[in-house]
Image (cartoon, helix red, strand yellow):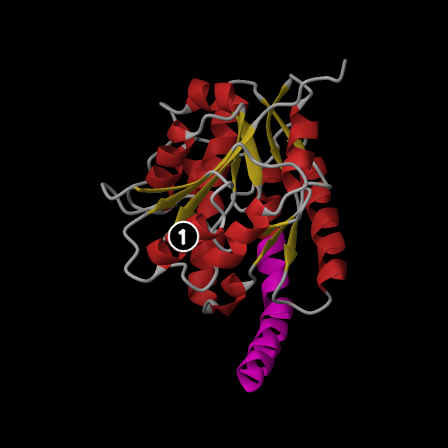
Amino acid sequence: MPEKRPTVSIVIPAYNEESTIRGCLLAAIMQTVTATEIIVVNNKSTDATAEIVKTIQVEHPDANLIYTEQNESQGITPTRNFGFNLAKGDVIGRIDSDSVIEPNWVEQVQKAFQDETVAAATGPVLYYDMPLRRFGLKADDRVRRMINKLTRDFHFLFGSNMAIRRTAWEEIRDETCLDKEDELHEDVDLSVHLAEHKLKVVYVSAMVSGMSARRLEDSPRDYAFYVRRFERTYKKHGLTSPRLKAPMIVFFAIYPFLKPVRAIRKRKEKKAA
């Protein structure tokens, strides 16, 4: 008798994502293994995000695409929490509204969570709006595996491509930081709370999500503020291990090399438009 695989919900927090939400949802719908539900949590969007999601609901009535709103607080953390608390799957997948998951993403998540000791999983990303995308995926995978070796027993979740067992979420949800000042990395905060409860986080190379490299368009000051969210998250939790600086070092190192590549790509996109 075949082993029963866990059911997977996908939660997508969204704020003013009219340019990316359609591609994100179509990728989530067109999976080799169907997600139990796809939950879009709209957080006070002022653009056409809601209308696009509702149009896709009509176009794909069998997809179990759920549209809901979280209007009490602005921010990724309360919006994520709202979606996680609604999810009914054994495992809650979490991606961004500019993520484009690979067609076998749900299938890979199911495989990872067949190991009952796994509480959460994360994987590499393919930057779909950069040149040499498949080469970039291999590089991203290598770098993330290297970071996991450097940080040893502490494994980071990446918010654009992660999944958490619903029972693990229920165990830590009341302890996660709400980050009202919007200064932390919500995915790193989640990782810290999982580690505090000795809940196992694994890295799965085959669990691939595409995402935009638009962060590289930030000014050096804004980019530095983003990267230093690691530092502020560690400080919030009293973490001082030098090993945990590995992701910050990587992010700062790639910026001066990849920013001009992204700028060239943007110029080409404008010419082609």
Region of the chain picked out in magenta, as a range: 250-273
Q: Is residue 77 magenta?
A: no
Q: At numbered mark 1, what does the secondary structure look like: helix, strand or loop? A: helix
In the displayed structure image, the side of residue 154 where residue 88 appears, left or right = left
The image shows a total of numbered marks equal to 1
Density class for disc 1 (Cα within 10 Å; few <14, some 14-19, many ≥20) is many
Q: Nearer the viewer, residue 51 or 248?
A: 51
Q: Identify the residue at image location x=24%, y=44%.
A: 71
Report which residue position mark 1 lands on. Answer: 53
Q: Nearer the viewer, residue 217 or 49?
A: 49
Q: Main secondary structure of the magenta part?
A: helix
Q: Is residue 99 visible?
A: no
Coordinates of residue 253 in the picture (x, y in percent)? 63, 60
Q: Identify the residue at image location x=75%, y=48%.
A: 142
| 65 w.r.t. 226: above or below | above
Coordinates of residue 262 in the picture (x, y in percent)? 59, 72
Q: Furthest residue to the left?
A: 72
Q: Quadrant of residue 178?
A: top left
Q: Nearer the viewer, residue 22 or 268?
A: 22
Coordinates of residue 50 in the picture (x, y in percent)? 34, 54
